[in-house]
Structure formats: C-alpha cells, structure tokens
Amino acid sequence: MFDEHDKTWRFFKIFNLIIVALLCLSIILPFLNILALSLNEGTDAQRGGISFFPREFSFENYIEVFKQSTILNAFGISLFRTVVGTIISVFLTAMAAYALKTKTLPGRKFITFFIFFTMLFSGGIVPYYLVLTELHLTNTIWVYIIPSLYSVWNILIMRTFFLQIPDSIEEAARIDGCSEFQIFLKIILPMSKPVIATIGLFNAVAHWNDWFSGSFYVRNPELKPLATILQEMLTRQQALADALMKNSGAYELIEKITVTGDSLKMATIILVVAPIIMIYPFIQKYFVKGVNIGSVKE
C-alpha cells in the first residue's frame, strides 16, 4: 500500500516538474527570441530564420531608440512616478486595509461593499477626464500618481493578509500603551513584508508600463514617461516605413536602412521589461508568499 502511494506521489511530482519546465520554456524562449531580434539588423531579421542568437549582430536598434532627445528625460519621469507612486500607494493602501480590518470600525461592512462596488462599475473615460481637468491634474506629473493612489483590489488583498495576523499581538501592544498608528507602523507593517512586496511589485509594473496616461492626459513632451515616448516612436517609425514602401522611387533608400519597425519594437520591449526583471530577484522570496494570500483558510 505504501509502495503504491510512494509511486503515485513520485509520478505526481515528476508530472508537476515537467509542467513547470514547459511553462518556464514557454516564457524564456520567446524572450530570448525577442532579445536576439533586438540585437540583429532589422532588414536582415525580415528574412526570418532567427531563433535565439542574432545572425547580423548590431546595436543599431538600441542606438536609434536612444537618439530620441527626450528619452533620458522620459526615463527620469518613469523612474519618479514608479518610485514615488509605488511608495505612497502602498502606504495609503495599507492604511485603508488596516482600517477595514479593524472590527470596531463603524460601518465597516458598508464601507467595504461601497469601495468594492466602485471596482465593478466606473463612470467611463469622459467623466474621468473631466474630473482630472477640474482638479487641474492634466498636463502635470501628478496625473500619473494621484489617480492611482488606491486600488480596491490591492486594498482587499492587504485586508485579507492583515486578518491573518493574530489579534492577541495587537492587544498586547495596546496594553503596552501603543496607539493605533504605532501598532500599524511598528507591528503590522513589519509583519506584512510579503504582501507589501507583492502589492509594491504590482504597482511598480503598472506605473512603469503605463503609456495611456501620458498619451491622453499630458501634452507637454517633457512630462511624458518612457512607455509613452517609445510607443509614439514606434508609431512614427512604422508610418515612415509604410510611406517608403508606397514610394516606388525609395527602394535604394530602403536598402540602406538597417532599422525596421519590427526590430525597433523588439528593442523597445527589452528596454521596458529589463528594469522589472532586475527588480524581481530582490523581492522574489516575499512575492511567492504574497501571491498565496488567502489560498488556505485555517
């Protein structure tokens, strides 16, 4: 009986390892292909046949990206909104989650339902834009940060984590004379590193990858983030390539071009993804714990 159980368990573990390995390959191999295409001459890449290593090695795609005069400024804008926006958002989200977790909060269930309702239904893009205009947030750097300070989903995730912290710890702190804010700051937050890392990563990725806000709510090119600048650059490059293809007398010029819209797109993907990839290893141990919040009820 035990031998059959051991064989079944061993088969189950092997099966899981195979599935996880295939999943990893399905993520890593496309990324390596994108990296190879970004380091290959664009016109040569159009011939096809490139898998995981560049055939005609070249940095021209990245040089073309960094030729943009606003690229460094855009990088600074993205870095500012990601760091400042993530820190403020995580702190305020934690405060809201702690308040909703407190059983003595008057109307706690109604407030929870009220904010959950806003996650299901929204006013739409036009009312949202009008509100931003009335608050004088459009065409300012704060349009990236203030509207995204709170996320109902993140509040509910943090609240679920805080509910797993024993009440006896808070009771002991109150007996020692700690105020609610001291309990939150010195006890709850230090014990909540997994969920803070998880929510922080979600916020950072959302801020870093957001090109929509810069396209619709900001007119000043010096305030546009990296994602928006790169998206606009790709649009211009593709429009130029289409115009050249329609011009029958431009074939000699096309042959001299080593950068194409597709190769530029691959370099852009690498530049956008690379910072997030470099951050992930430092918070991996917390992230794994954080994504399991609420998966097991005791």
Image (tube, grey):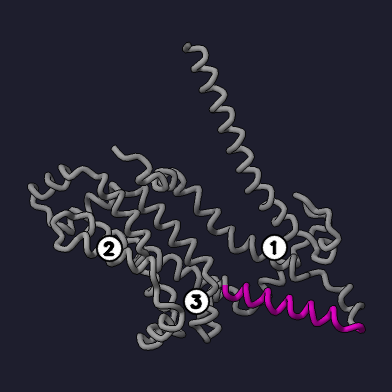
Tag 1 near tag 2, CB within 8 Å:
no
Helix, strand, or loop for circle 2? helix
Q: Nearer the viewer, mark 1 or mark 2?
A: 2
Residue 29 in the image: above or below residue 17: below
Residue sitting nearer the eye, 28 or 176: 28
Name the mark on residue 113. 2
Highlighted magenta segment, given as a residue range:
228-249
How much space separates mark 3 and mark 1, taking CA atoms?
22 Å
How much space separates mark 3 and mark 2, taking CA atoms?
28 Å
Q: If you read the primary sequence from the N terminus, does the residue marked by circle 1 or circle 2 appear first?
A: 2
Rendered location of residue 224, percent (x, y): 53, 78
For the point 86% across and 75% down, which residue is it?
254
Rendered location of residue 201, percent (x, y): 44, 56
Q: Which residue is mark 3?
A: 213
Name the mark on residue 266. 1
Helix, strand, or loop for circle 3? helix
Rendered location of residue 152, percent (x, y): 35, 63
Name which residue type carries label 2.
Answer: Phe
Residue 93 in the image: above or below residue 68: above
